[in-house]
Image: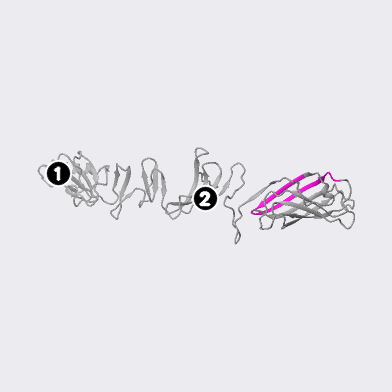
Amino acid sequence: MTPNLALTLLAASQAQKHVTINEALTRIDAAAQTAVLTRTLTAPPTTPADGDRYLIDGPATGDWQGHEDQIAAWDAPAQGWLFLTPHPGWRVWIIDEDTLLARTAASTWQPVGGGGQLNPVAGDLLGVNTSADAANRLAVASPGVLLTHEGAGIRTKLNKAAASDTASLLLQTNYSTRTEFGLVGDDDTVLKTSPDGSAFTEAMRIPAATARPGFPQGITLAGATPLTRYEEGDFTLTLGPGATSGQWDAATGLAVESARYTRIGNLVHLRAAFRFTGLPDAPITAATSRSLDMAPFTPTDAAPTDSFDHAGMATIVGPLSNGGSAFAFAYLNKIGRLFLSLAPPAINPPETSALILLNLTYEAD
């Protein structure tokens, strides 16, 4: 017999040579261009067609018993099974899987590509050292993946069809997502985290239109309370009731040039520039005070409403008769009402039309 296909050789002066030749041709026909219907059967099918081939799974039973991992071909004229023992290097196409297998030196079947590293499958699927599927058409099992340049730079792209779709990178533990980063349902850049792979919390969002990062959960610095808020804007400055005395008590309104606030966490800084209106045009010669309603955020403390826990400074600038400036103390109470208190300077008291520059920092709810 031949060593590879076990073909019976003709003997000298052999009678009925056609029988031996026909058997050899049948075996060659079974081994050439090997394509088996499946590799999942352990028992012969009941009605095989002439030439049907199978890669026998184990443990085999019936007429296939003892032929595990061999190729079985149905020979209709002989009404029997022809068995081929594969050798290293043989290749077999698995029809129901659309997969090409190769026989290894270790007597195992591996997807073609070198040691089982590539697993090409019909439908544009490719697995590298693993199996691809409809959801993961390219699958790689490897300690690392390298994408390198070709003489210059390199870019990796994730492209989605529409703004409402998603293009993101998922970081997983045992196939359960813990972090998602990318364009998730819109065109803003988003970072989300999850402790269990089902409930996600948004940690960062960068709007595509403004490129200004937002941190919905705040930022925690080392050893610090989380910084959960940053805000800035304008606030309204008006005359307040009560607790007034002296010349400022006669004010009928304010001429506000600017009134801005900046809030970082619970810390609020106010800055404003304004003049009192309706005052007599005369220098201030005695102590005076005036209440203003202004705080854009309620101060946070346990102090009573009429208690002054937040202090600041108001600078009064020209036109002053002394050509310089004067200072008033600013006090903020629990409900956000400001009180300005001015004691006359030692020399050249300020004019009533002078500009007041306010700076005050306090802690808010």
Q: Hey, what amino acid is under mark 2?
A: Thr
In this figure, which residue is indicated by the disc labeled 2? 201
Pointer 1 local density, CA inside 10 Å: few below 14, some 14–19, many at least 20: some
Residue displayed at 21% across by 46% down: 72
Q: Which of 266/96 is in front?
A: 266
Left or right, 139 with reference to 327: left
Q: Which of 9/347 is in front?
A: 347
Mark number displayed over residue 123: none
Mark number displayed over residue 20: 1
In the image, is residue 238 part of the stretch drawn in magenta? no
Kindly tell me whether residue 143 is visible in this rendering. Answer: yes
**x then y, percent, for residue 55:** 25, 47
Q: Hey, what amino acid is under mark 1?
A: Thr
Left or right, 126 with reference to 65: right
**x then y, percent, for residue 40:** 26, 47
**x then y, percent, for residue 207:** 59, 44
**x then y, percent, for residue 168:** 50, 46
- Camera-side mark, 1 or 2: 2
Q: Which of 169/314 is in front?
A: 314
In the image, is residue 275 part of the stretch drawn in magenta? yes
Q: Which of 230/303 is in front?
A: 303
Q: Which residues are magenta?
A: 257-279
Give the prevailing secondary structure in the magenta stretch: strand
Tell me the element at label 1: helix
Question: How far apart, in angstroms, are the residues tagged by discs 1 and 2?
Answer: 75 Å
Residue displayed at 30% across by 43% down: 93
Left or right, 41 with reference to 267: left
Q: Residue furthest bottom?
A: 223
